[in-house]
Image (spheres, coloured by chain):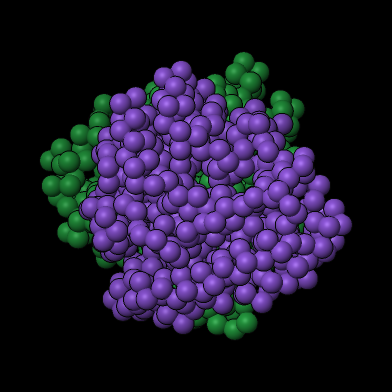
Chain colours: A purple, B green
Amino acid sequence: MPSQRLAAVVSSPVRDLLALIDRPDVISFAGGLPAPELFDLANWRTAFDTALSGPHARRHLQYAPTEGDPRLRAAAAARMTARGLPTAADQLLITTGSQQALTLVAAALLDPGAVVAVDQPTYLAALQCFGMAGARIVPVTPDDPDTLARVFTRERPTLLYLVPTFANPTGRTLDAHRRAAIVALAQRHGVWIVEDDPYGELRYRGEHLTPMAAAGDRVIHLGSLSKIGAPGLRLGWLRAPAPLRAALIVAKQAADLHTSTIDQAAAAAYLDATDLDAHIDRLRDAYRERRDTMLAALPEIMPDGATWTDPDGGMFVWVRLPGGADTAQLLPVALEHDVAFVPGAPFYAADPDPATLRLSFTAATPAVIREGMRRLGKALTAG
Amino acid sequence: MPSQRLAAVVSSPVRDLLALIDRPDVISFAGGLPAPELFDLANWRTAFDTALSGPHARRHLQYAPTEGDPRLRAAAAARMTARGLPTAADQLLITTGSQQALTLVAAALLDPGAVVAVDQPTYLAALQCFGMAGARIVPVTPDDPDTLARVFTRERPTLLYLVPTFANPTGRTLDAHRRAAIVALAQRHGVWIVEDDPYGELRYRGEHLTPMAAAGDRVIHLGSLSKIGAPGLRLGWLRAPAPLRAALIVAKQAADLHTSTIDQAAAAAYLDATDLDAHIDRLRDAYRERRDTMLAALPEIMPDGATWTDPDGGMFVWVRLPGGADTAQLLPVALEHDVAFVPGAPFYAADPDPATLRLSFTAATPAVIREGMRRLGKALTAG
């Protein structure tokens, strides 16, 4: 009954996984959720009240321009400029979360049968999104420029999708040298790069890396307030190279006319009245401790031969179990022990490694992480 | 550079038109905007404050289920049930405005080359949305069941898109007899009906008509808070027949994961604390007077031979000028006289009638409508 395009996306893994979170007795390392107790609730409440007060209050309940609230675009542009990506407000399109930006890019760039190159493993809702657009998805290894060049030559992808900083699901980061090489290669082959950057400000050690978009004009940069502000507002932004901007705005208009006027106005008021950098420092301190707690527990619970990533920032640790393990079969055992993770296979565009799994460390306190890891250890022994 | 699919949607008429609204000296009958001075601002401010207070406040800033806020779904279902369309909360999917519902329906049902039948003229952003999905659009005359049956037989459309109550742009309403005939015909031919109903509660005379979705299980019904609450929140809902629901939820997840958690929570709080029916009564009284004011002015300013609709509700009057007029050429003349309308051609899927135009009467007070109509009369004489 559904369209072939949609039927091809057989399941909805993110959604099935989000369902695991709500059982209150489960300690979930599954969802990529920010910690709710760290939300800047009082200032958000003030920001909504500000947006619904004063002479422009009624305008914030009305239809609004597709591109987004001018004050929010200016504030986002200023933040990007400060992080080494010089950006003018009119280069930005406000999106309903950066998830929407993926759909807009797909609508604006992908004809059915177009090829999309993706890191492997990668964000599974991006795979889903490109799949729904009728694209053929080709996995690449961005860390290996020779292979990347061969794939660009052979497959002629329309775009390369990357989460170059603290990637979902691996937590890995592409270094400055590699970034420059990939941008140059994409430029040479006429490939668009989508640089999805929701986690870049959540760095727990090491030096900030300049976004790839600063190095070339074929990079579409996606930013988001979800991990540094609050995901419930569904606010992201897309920095589009000039030749794509008009098409993306048409796609955005067809998608939802514009993003919530009141949420945009509240975010503009929030950024105006609050020191977001100070808030991000608080997030960093808390998440760094959670990261360290999880990484300290891993050697105690993991079997010999297991490996895992050691992320400099973001939300995720990526684990590989030894000896032909299948984490999809481990998950029900883990749930019996009241702990959850995400099996790794759905993050692969091809040839999934069933021995992998993703753990998120941001949503639980250190004490809860320790207890959750203890449970996971018992599940690993039982499973 | 953009995809063929998108390049086919050559322009963005709604967007170009919204740009006309912001010149403060122009009296605009162009946009389909609700009157901002009638927004229930104080109660909305309270609703946001309620949603960001109390024990669940932090949850309202967090990621949330794709289907939508359970309280909002229940409240919307109760309203639909009360209007003659028995609905359970789990039949509804909350959408980011009903514009998004069109995109989701397109993603869930239309393969490239699928046929979509539409009323002629019809909502232009729906034409754009189906066009972007790669559909072939075939205009029909829903008031003529024989022609409709022939089109269903010959073109085998996947879906029929209708705004059956106070249509955009004509203001026309399909009567109960015709609704039943169309639903039966669609059922027989295996055609889905999309019943887009943003205006249904804005009735100024006559009796309420039961939604088409009550008559058959092949009708996808779209509701919205934009015209009865506030469009800035981008809140709509889609009542989906069971076989489509899973596919629509997957499409929604790819589109934006979920609609703004805080806007949904505020709307649920608003509907809980406020008498929306009393508010709609106030809107009806104000809009009825505006409608009457515009219709009273039309005979005074229109040339002999002009015709127009006489809507029972909604926001629009549809005008046809005599003698080979071209309203696209009239528009710049009207703007010179500081008044705006929408030329009719973009609302046609095929064979546009250039002598038509759309006037919206909701956003201006009666005094402003009278002045705007005087200006339009001068433009008609000058043009």
- The total number of labels drawn is 0
Indicate whether B60 appears above or below B302: below
* Residue positioned 14% across, 50% down in the render: B337
Indicate whether A285 appears above or below B63: below
* Camera-nearest residue between A75 and A325: A325
In the image, B347: left or right of B118?
left
Seen from this angle, which residue lies furthest front? Answer: A304
In the image, B7: left or right of A166?
left
* Camera-nearest residue between A310 and B227: A310
Residue B169 coordinates in the image, percent (x, y): 42, 43
Residue A365 coordinates in the image, percent (x, y): 62, 75
* Camera-nearest residue between A87 and A286: A286
Where the N terminus of chain B falls, by quadrant?
top left
* Residue positioned 73% across, 72% down in the render: A371
Where the C terminus of chain B falls, by quadrant?
top left
Give the quadrant of residue B364.
Answer: bottom left
Give the quadrant of residue A186.
Answer: top left
Residue B62 coordinates in the image, percent (x, y): 56, 67
Residue A30 coordinates in the image, percent (x, y): 67, 58
Seen from this angle, which residue lies furthest top? Answer: B154
* Residue positioned 71% across, 64% down in the render: A300
In the image, B209: left or right of A73?
right
Q: Is residue A150 visible?
A: yes
In the image, B368: left or right of A145?
left
Indicate whether B77 appears above or below B377: below
* Residue positioned 69% across, 50% down in the render: A306
Q: Is residue B141 visible?
A: no
* Camera-nearest residue between B378 and A41: A41
